[in-house]
Amino acid sequence: MTTSPVQFPLRAILWVAFFAAILAAWAFMFMMARMSGVDMIGRPVGMNMMPMTTFGALFPMWAIMMAAMMLPTMVPTLRDYERLMISADGTRAGWLGVLLGYFIVWVGFAGLITLVQLGLIAFNVIDGLGISTTGFFAAALLIVVGAFQFTRAKEICHGVCHAPMNYFLGKWRTGFGGGLRMGLGLGAFCVGCCWGFMMLGFVGGVMSLLWMGLATLFMVFEKLPEIGHRVTKPAGVLLILAGLVVAVMAL
């Protein structure tokens, strides 16, 4: 895409800021994991200096985690919007609106999953580090998330996330407000597509950097045009098999 001398510095600054925010979020999560006394896979190896058993402590953690895990998946979407900035009268303000709308939805999901975690802690289903206290719960989560990969809801939501250009063409709005509206819509479909992978944090611990990295990598793969549709169902099979193995081990 060609850009004018005025546009290029702004574009470069915004993209650098975007990736800097992702790096900062990952650095913050690494620091929180160390302070929580867990290793790379989320298992306790030291003293927990950052108890997370209240909404005030958990919600910021989940919000930052959403930035670390979901912003990388936005790259194809933001690139598609840029392709429309000339042909469809898009603007850099609209680009920012798309990004903000998307993140607002995921922050909302962070609040919801925080409440879920507090409920699971209250019923002693998970511990203070977000680790499942029973193999049967972990197995059920793996099987449910794996089965969801084969549902019509997953297909619809993934279809939008996998091809954001089609969404833009069908829902196109100009300006910051238009971008915000489209970002909110895209974020809602993305939550519908990827909520299960966030829930899988309760299998091995929500502070597991290994889980965060693998989940982020897979969600990025799911959005790649070349291979996105090819990895969804195989992942479902693997998750179901893993759940059955965990269930047998819990007997």
Image (cartoon, rainbow, N blue to C red):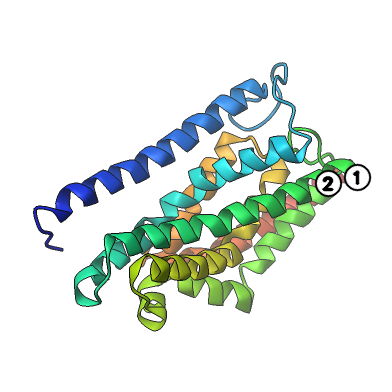
Q: Is residue 160 above or below residue 128?
A: below
Q: Depth check: 9 or 52 in front?
A: 9
Q: Amino acid at mark 2?
A: Leu
Seen at 56% across and 67% down, the residue is 188
Q: Are marks 2 and 1 in contact (CB under 8 Å)?
A: yes
Q: Residue furthest left?
A: 5
Quarter location, residue 153: bottom right
Q: Secondary structure at mark 2?
A: helix
Q: Position of residue 25 (x, y in %)?
A: 48, 37
In this view, 80 is above or below 126: below
Residue under circle 1? 123
- Residue 197 visible in this rendered orientation of the protein: no
Q: Along the line of sight, which residue is nearer the eye, 94 or 140?
A: 94
Can residue 177 be seen here?
Answer: yes
Q: Residues within 10 Å of mark 1 (few under 14, many from 20)?
A: few
Residue drawn at 63 percent across, 59 percent down: 195
Which is nearer the eye, 45 or 246? 45
Left or right? Give the position of 59 relative to 179.
right
Q: Percent x, y for residue 53?
A: 78, 35
Picture residue at 58% right of the left edge, 60% below the top = 194
At a point 59% along the width and 41% down the height, the residue shown is: 211
Q: What residue would you read off at disc 2?
A: 120
Kindly indicate the quadrant of the structure image that contains residue 154.
bottom right
Answer with left or right where residue 19 lies relative to residue 192: left
| Farthest-out residue, top | 47
* Left or right placement of residue 151 versus residue 216 in this view: right
Query: What is the three-letter code of the residue carrying label 1?
Result: Phe
Picture coordinates of residue 87 (x, y %)?
20, 76
Whole-number angstrom distance, CA of label 2 to CA of label 1 = 5 Å
- Indicate the position of residue 171 as horizontal and vertical percent values: 42, 80
Q: Secondary structure at mark 1?
A: loop
